[in-house]
Image (cartoon, rainbow, N blue to C red):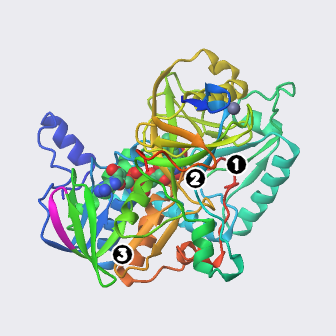
Amino acid sequence: MKKYSIFSLLRNSINFHQDWQKAWRSPDPKSCYDVIIIGGGGHGLATAYYLAKEHGITNVAVLEKGWLGGGNTGRNTTIIRSNYLWDESAALYEKSLQLFEGLSQDLNYNIMLSQRGVLNLAHNLHDLREINRRVNAIRLNGIDSEFLNVNQIKAFIPIINISRKIRYPILGASLQRRGGVARHDAVAWGFARAGDARGVDIIQNCEVTGIVHEKGRVSGVETTKGFIGAKKLGIVVAGHSTVLAGMAGLRLPIQSYPLQAMVSEPIKPIINCVVMSNAVHCYVSQSDKGELVLGAGIDSYNSYGQRGSLNVIEDQLAALCELFPLFSRLRLIRQWGGIVDTSPDASPIISKTPIDGLYLNCGWGTGGFKATPGSGWVFAHTIATDQPHELNAPFRLERFTSGALIDEHGAAAVAH
Amino acid sequence: MLVIECPWCGPRSEEEFTNGGEAHIKRPSKPSALSDEEWADYVFMRKNTKGIFLERWSHSSGCRRWFNAARNTITNEIAAIYHINEKPPKEIS
Ligand SMILES: Cc1cc2nc3c(=O)[nH]c(=O)nc-3n(C[C@H](O)[C@H](O)[C@H](O)COP(=O)(O)OP(=O)(O)OC[C@H]3O[C@@H](n4cnc5c(N)ncnc54)[C@H](O)[C@@H]3O)c2cc1C
Ligand SMILES: [Zn+2]
């Protein structure tokens, strides 16, 4: 792999950019791999990269039914933060944020991490108490978090409406300054390129149609490109987790819901951080292209149709216009949906399964982009050593039998 | 946005309804005899069918009554609506 640098940029610009090396090969699948990762989203690609980098396992393939990052990775609103309430989640998401902070260097790929701060608004007395409790809990875990009063909020983000006369006035907020956004495609492409350079085979347009297992052990997968053998298999397919688990005869506590996002027409820089509101339910940031990136909650019924309902859009835009009246005359230019895998306690499942050699990483629901590197890092450990890392040990599938749930429904804010 | 046909009120907008998840789950008849695994299955494990899914709806902002529906979760097309105590129509199940 040729290194990206200021010199390679100069050299190639003289050449009218004709000589850039392909970012990854597109090999035909081998007959057998040590590890096959099903799903070429950020989490799957990160898993393959860390298997090669941290554990020296390079006979690895990532099988993706469509194109890399074409699932939720390329559809999400890219909010990154680690301000979670419970110790288990705080440790996992903070590990991920720390990996994000060094990721552009590590991958030699600019993922455009922008730690511009994430603000979570409080609109009533209960919100205020809850936010204060969370700020304290998060700080006890050594993670940056602070409380802002109304005047501090207005100073931080001058265009916000702090009128007391609106239906849900703003009363305070928590702020994680290290939170922010990153370029979603770049995260997938960076992991793909760096994994490929270490020998990982990335195989697109290859849908897994069956999981082959005998006597409680996996031996490979049936795909649209034929049978491919594997000693170990990792399922990392977000909205399709129950479909894939079903191929191995497993039942999961997962439901798939559409989650929508949308962008406005581009405007000059106007909002310098990420603003999220749980009570009126919307969140907003501004992309480098100038579009407002908007999102809110899931649709009310499970579905695999990547579009979503109009009433969800109406509700979040009403909320947005109350928080920022000056946005009311902006036009939307694009809207889309992704299928998110929600779990009963709003926490992921990163786990071994009852079948030997079969591993599961799912249940990230509406908030897994921020966890991409951390998820791959712990999942690679789980697959390589056949036991969870201490960071993901609490996130086992068995917690639904033991009752040791990690209830992150409040998730320090809206759950993204 | 879906238009859902309430068996009592007729076609109404999706916003008036609450989705109740998978239909036809039976409460265990002998709760005290259940193992932890069986409880986990009853409480947490759910079908998440890609295709025709049998589910419950409540017309929560209307007549507040419950009913069952068979919906294609890929297209969101509702193939059948039937009463809460009925089995799905033969051509579907
Ligand atoms: C609109 C929206 C907004 C969001 N906003 C945020 C946010 O602001 N912050 C945040 O942290 N998270 C957010 N999320 C959640 C986040 O996007 C996901 O949790 C995360 O990207 C999941 O990554 P993944 O790699 O597991 O899944 P994906 O990127 O969905 O990858 C799974 C891949 O598996 C492939 N696949 C499926 N079935 C098969 C098969 N049979 N064979 C082969 N491949 C298969 C799919 O094609 C897909 O590419 C948002 C999600 C959505 C939809
Ligand atoms: Zn009715």
Tag 2 residue = B23
Could you classify mark 3 by the number of other residues whose Cα lies within 10 Å: few (under 14), some (14-19), or many (20 or more)?
A: many
Q: Give how far across and how far down residue A373 sits, in percent.
A: 44, 62
Q: Where residue A359 sits in the image (x, y, percent)?
A: 39, 73
Gap between marks 1 and 3, in whole Å? 39 Å
Element type at marker 3? strand
Question: Does residue A225 belong to the magenta stretch?
Answer: yes
Q: Please rate how many residues cluster around mark 1, counting C-alpha atoms within 10 Å: few if below 14, some from 14 to 19, many from 20.
A: many
**Which chain is mark 3 on?**
A
Question: Which residue is under mark 3?
Answer: A358
Q: Mark 2: which amino acid?
A: Ala
Q: Is residue A179 left or right of residue A155?
A: left
Q: Nearer the viewer, residue B24 or A301?
A: B24
The residue that appears at 64% across and 80% down in the rendered structure is B34
**Sequence-earlier tag: 1 or 3:** 1
Say whether marks 1 and 3 touch (CB < 8 Å). no
The percent position of residue A73, horizontal first and vertical second, equals: 41, 48
Q: Which residue is mark 1?
A: A175
Task: Identify the amino acid type marked 3.
Answer: Leu
Q: Tag 1, which chain?
A: A
Tell whether B77 sits left or right of A225.
Answer: right
Q: Quadrant of residue A26?
A: bottom left
Marks 1 and 2, how far apart in space?
A: 42 Å
Q: Residues under labels 2 and 3: Cα distance? A: 30 Å
Number of labels in the image equals 3
Q: Nearer the viewer, mark 1 or mark 2?
A: 2
